[in-house]
Image: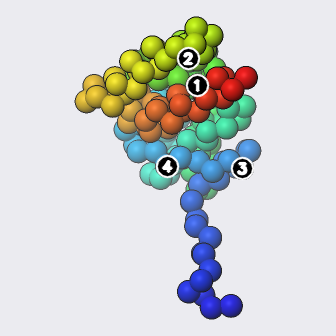
Amino acid sequence: MNKAFTREIEDHGGYCPTCGAVGTDVLQATLAAHVPAEAREHLADSAWFCPHSTCAVAYFDRFDRTVGTDVLTQPVYPKDPAAPICPCFGLTCDDIEADVQEGVVTRVKAHLEQANSGDARCVTMSASGQSCIPAVQRYFMKHRGQ
């Protein structure tokens, strides 16, 4: 087969050594905000966040060195479902579920406006260093369909 018509497998670089989930590449600022200095010392400069909710690993590097959820500076979503799904503005899963139960999108809509503002600090507040908007939308749609 002609290689021009085949798609090469992308190397995401980081697969959690415990659960095998594809990790989210994180910046050093993200690690510094969530991992105590002594726990960060053994990680390489490139590290990933494990997004699997039940995995005990929070961060890992290419050498399979890990930082567990038990050493994080505060609980983080999705590792702890009671932690805010949006740490910047405090939106919780309970807030989203309340919108679903009431048949409104009041809290979610207000949150999306905040999350799209310049006040969002995702790089340091979010454990993945990414915006929470996709997670909020997925959570809302999942519970709306139930």
Q: Residue at x 52, y 28 (%)?
A: 136
Residue type, numbered disc 1: Phe
Callout 3 crowding tier (Cα within 10 Å): few <14, some 14–19, many ≥20 = few
Question: What residue lies at 42% left-to-right and 21% top-to-bottom?
Answer: 109
Q: CA distance from mark 2 to mark 1?
A: 6 Å
Does residue 35 sit above or below 101 in this rendering?
below
How many numbered marks are there? 4
Q: Nearer the viewer, residue 42 or 77?
A: 77
Cβ–Cβ under 8 Å for marks 2 and 1: yes
Give the percent coordinates (x, y) of residue 78. Answer: 61, 28
Measured Cα–Cα span from mark 2 to mark 3: 29 Å
Q: Name the residue: 62% across, 10% down.
A: 101
Instruction: Decide which of tag 2 and tag 1 comes sooner along the chain.
Output: 2
Amino acid carrying mark 2 in the image: Ile
Say which residue label 1 marks: 140
Report if residue 35 is visible in the image: no
Q: Position of residue 10 (x, y in %)?
A: 58, 67
Q: Earlier in the sequence, mark 2 or mark 3?
A: 3
Tell which of 38 and 140 is nearer to you. Answer: 140
Mark 4 or mark 1, earlier in chain: 4
Between 131 and 76, which is closer to the camera in this rendering? 131
* Circle 4 residue: 25
Which label sits in the foreground, 2 or 3?
A: 2
Element class at badge 3: loop
- State the image coordinates of residue 130 (x, y, percent, origin top left): 44, 39
